[in-house]
Amino acid sequence: MDAALIIETVIKAVLVLAVVAGLAGFATYVERKILAFMQRRLGPMNVGPHGILQLAADGIKLFTKEDLVPQNAVAPIFKIAPVIAPVCAFTAMAAVPFFPEFTVFGYKVTPIISDINIGILFVLGVASAGMYAPLLAGMSSSNKWALIGAARTVIALLSFEVVSGLALLAPIMMIGSLSLIDINDYQVGGVGSWLIWSQPVAFILFMIAGFAETNRTPFDLIEYEAEIISGYATDYSGMRWGLFFIGEYANMITVSLLVSLVFLGGYNPLWIIPGGIMILLKVSFFIFLFLWVRAAWPHIRPDQLMWLCWKVLMPLALINILITGIVLI
Amino acid sequence: MFELIAFYTFSILTIGMFCIVVFSKNALYAMSALAGGMIFISGFFFLLEAEFLGVVQIIVYSGAVMALYAFGMMFFDTTRDVKENINNKKILYTLSILSAILIVVILCAPIFSANIEAIYPAKLEGVGNVQMIGLVLFTKYLIPFELAAVMLLVAMISGIVLVSKRMDANLTEDEQEHIEGETI
């Protein structure tokens, strides 16, 4: 291992951390604006032009708010839990290729922190380990709402993980590799070779599982305000609370990247649009889709989530794998 | 150099975590440390360039320990210390020391007689980690693999059968009818 590689890796890691954490903050502003637009409101308007500085105001509020630890909570676990969410979300990004290769001053840069040849499994596994954050937060708060939130985290994890794994198996069978770069290169031949055309079922299943994994609206049962106050986050304040949401938005970005890479051609250039712009467009579209669904769909109950995942989506995913296998043979 | 640093970091973290699992009286500490230890173990797999096993370690154990948490939630107040009910400390200590020595002997015996050899060394040119596992699983170890799959299927079906016994019937309604029948 030479020094250049280490410096390069450190620079990449810091860049990913800074950019994604910034984007996660910005996404809260975008979310409020888009939700307001869909509900015929104005959204944040007062701080800066069109409320764009609301972001800074929120940041100041989060950082300066008093950091409370409830009296009966298990303090060490209570304090560690919020850190797990962003740590897992950012660790998962280590194996995600963001852009095509490019050269800076004659030095070839591959925009992926660590090119391990099982990238997609790593991303899925580490992202689902991030569910420990709400679980530990809920169990250490010694608060009934938080405990119910933690229990719901377990059933959400056990439900969506099966679906997302089985849904991704079919495209992986076609490609024959778990590396995200190989998956991207498989779809190099323009729109016609995107995997969404040959694996539409897997695409929809993985999208649904992605919504469940990131706790977004149709499946945000672990923090649904009307039922369990704020679920696992009931007792959190200030930046500890903010860390959960940095993790959630970073996970949204990861899931959007995964869907774009696996099903929508990734960072391959299209017509005159270069690859780097293409992936940004796709990821932005999926972030928008997350917000759109939040505005358009009601919440579902935990039993409905389990019914959906185990009785509808899992058999569908298995049938999809079977058909893919028969076609491949 | 870096592998050495990584190895010692992961060793210290893993051993520390599992010490907490054993010594802590709080179920929440023990389970969290168990989850952390399981995830740190995957670091060794990554160091040995067995990435697939490392990731499988993370996925399988994060799910499995999650289920333990669920049991913890159902049976304990996890924020309080567990009161251990030990009647005879001498028997406990003797048994645990004996079993520890037994495990060490079992694990060290083949190393001392230098009998550990990889039948399928993992270094083949141009064959990745995942392909290697696939080759070994579906050639040399096909029958144990299929048997394990059948055993898991049997366990799953028996679990479902045991749990879902008379799931369509409502227990409280049955009791009601029973009581009414008696009074009539």
Image (cartoon, coloured by chain):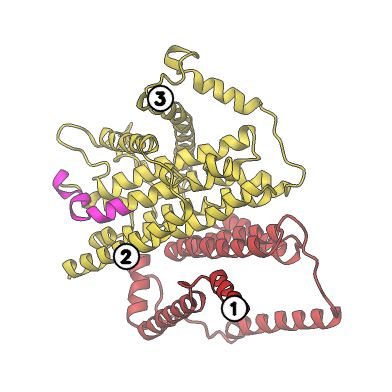
Q: Which residue is mark 2?
A: A315
In this rendering, position of residue A92 left or right of residue A40: right
Q: Which residue is mark 1?
A: B184
| Residue drawn at 25 percent across, 55 percent down | A201
Residue A4 in sight: no
Q: Is residue A200 magenta?
A: yes
Q: Are marks 2 and 3 on the same chain?
A: yes
Q: Colour of chain A?
A: yellow
Q: Position of residue A211 (x, y in %)?
A: 40, 46
Residue drawn at 19 percent across, 70 percent down: A326
Secondary element under disc 1, as helix, strand or loop, is loop
Q: In the figure, what tint was chain B given?
A: red
**Pointer 2 and pointer 3: residues touching (CB < 8 Å)?**
no
Name the residue type under label 3: Ala
SS assignment at label 3: helix
Q: Give the residue type at disc 2.
A: Pro
Q: Compared to B154, does B72 lie above or below?
A: above
Chain part drawn in magenta: A191-205
Q: Do callouts 3 and 1 point to residues on the same chain?
A: no
Q: Earlier in the sequence, mark 2 or mark 3?
A: 3
Residue A258's x, y, as percent?
A: 34, 47
Q: Chain of mark 2?
A: A
Left or right, B75 with respect to B139, comes to: right
Residue found at x 51% / y 75%: B163
- Check disc 3 and report the residue beneath it: A36
